Amino acid sequence: MKLQVNKKIVILSASAVVALTALGAVSVRMMGHKASSTAHAAHSSKHEGHEASSAGESESEEAEVAEAVVEAHDASEEEVKEEVAEQIHEIHGNPASESHASESHVMNDEQSEGTSAHRVPASETHEAGEVSEHAHEQATEHSTEHSTEHSEAHQAPAPGIFGRFMNTYGQAFISIQAKVNELERAETENEHLRLENAHLRVQAETLRLGCKVQDSKAHVEKSVKSGGIDFQLTDIDYQPPSHLLPEQLYTLGVTYFKAHEDEKAVKIFNVLTEMQGNDSYKTAQTYLMSGVAWYRLEHFQWADAYFERALKTKANPENQTYHAQARLWRAMVAQKDQKRELAQGFLKDLIENHPHSTEAAWVNPKEGGRAPAASKSVHKPDLKSKHKSEAHGSH
C-alpha cells in the first residue's frame, strides 16, 4: 500500500509539474502579450482595432493552453487510477514478487515520470520561447510602425488655422492679385498711349503751322497795298516753340508783347492768325496787338495791314473798343508816312463811328467831357511827335 501511495504521490507530482509548466508557458505568453500591449499603449485611436484583435488572439491562445493542461491532468489521473488498480491486483496475486516488481515498476515509473516531467518542461519551455519571440517580434514591428508614423507626423505636420485659411482662399487671392496686376499694366499702357497721342497732336499742329508760315507771308504781303515793304518775316531770327499747344503759344505771345519783345510777338501772332482750321485767334484783339508790335518795330506797312484786318472783323459790342483803337493807330501810321489828309480822314471816321469812346475824347476834348470811360483803351498818342509812340495795348 505504501508503494501505491508513493506511486500516486509521484504521479500527482508529475502532473503538478506539467500543470505548473503549462501555467508558466501561459504566464510567459501573457507577459509577451502584455509587453506588446505596453508597446502599443502610446498609439492613438488609429491602432485600437489592431490592439483589440491582438488581445483576442492572446485570449484564444490562453484558452487553448488551459484546455491542453486540463486534458493532460485528466490523462494523468486516469493513468494513476489504472496503475493503482494494477498494483492492487498484483498484490493480491503474488505479494513477494509483486512487491519487488512493484518496487522496480515504481522505480521505472518514477524514472519515466521524471523523464516525462523533465521532457514536458522542455517542450513547454520551447513553446514559451516561441511565444516570447513572437511577442518580441510583434512589439518590434509595432514600435517600428509607431516610429515610422511618428517621423511621418513630424515630416508632415497638420496645417494650422493659417494653413487651412490659405488652402481655402489662397488660390482666390492669387487670382485677384493677378487681375489687379493686369489692370495696373493696362492703366499704365493707356497712360503711355495718351501721352503719345498728345505728343503726336503737338507734332501735327507744329507741322501744320510750319507749312502755313509761307502762306501767311504771302497773304500778308498781298494785304499790303503799298509797295514799300522792305522787311520780311524770315528776317526775324526767331522760331516759335513747336512743342506748345495753340493756347500756350498765345499766352507766350501776349507775354512777349507786354515785355516789348516785339519781334517774338509778331512771329507768334502771325502763326496764330494764319492757322488754318482754327479761327479762335483770328480776332480783332489779336490783329490789333500784331499791328501795334509792328508799329513799335517801325514797319508801318505791316502795322497798317494788321489794323485794317482788325477793322474787317465783325462789328459787335465786344469789338467796338478794338475797332476804335485800330482807326486811331491807322491815323498814326498815316501821320508817320507824311499823309496828313489820310490821317485826318481816319480821325474823322473814329469820331463818327465811336463818338463816346476814349479814343474820340483824345482827338476831340469837347466830346470827351460827355463820353463814358471805355473799359479797354490805349495811352493817348501824340500825333505831332516825330518819335516812336509807345502803345499800352489791350488785353
Image (cartoon, helix red, strand yellow):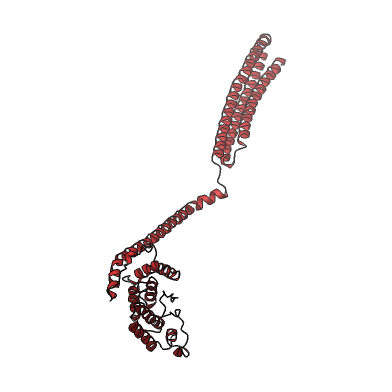
Instruction: Evaluate whether residue 53 shows in this view.
Output: no
Q: What is the x, y in percent for residue 195?
A: 40, 60
Q: How many marks?
A: 0
Q: What is the x, y in percent for residue 71?
A: 60, 27
Q: Residue at x 37, y 89 (%)?
A: 352
Q: In what quadrant of the picture does the C terminus appear?
A: bottom left
Q: What is the x, y in percent for residue 315?
A: 36, 84
**Could you say which quadrant of the image residue 116 lies in?**
top right
**Could you say which quadrant of the image residue 80 lies in?**
top right
Q: In what quadrant of the picture does the N terminus appear?
A: top right
Q: What is the x, y in percent for residue 122?
A: 61, 19
Instruction: Evaluate whether residue 365 shows in this view.
Output: yes
Q: Is residue 109 above or below residue 360?
A: above
Pick whichever, 89 or 262, lies toward us.
262
Q: Is residue 97 above or below residue 166?
A: above
Q: Is residue 204 left or right of residue 60?
A: left
**Could you say which quadrant of the image residue 356 lies in?**
bottom left
Q: Is residue 58 above or below residue 230?
A: above
Pick whichever, 133 or 285, lies toward us.
285
Pick whichever, 233 or 181, lies toward us.
233
Pick whichever, 222 or 154, lies toward us.
222
Farthest-out residue, right:
2
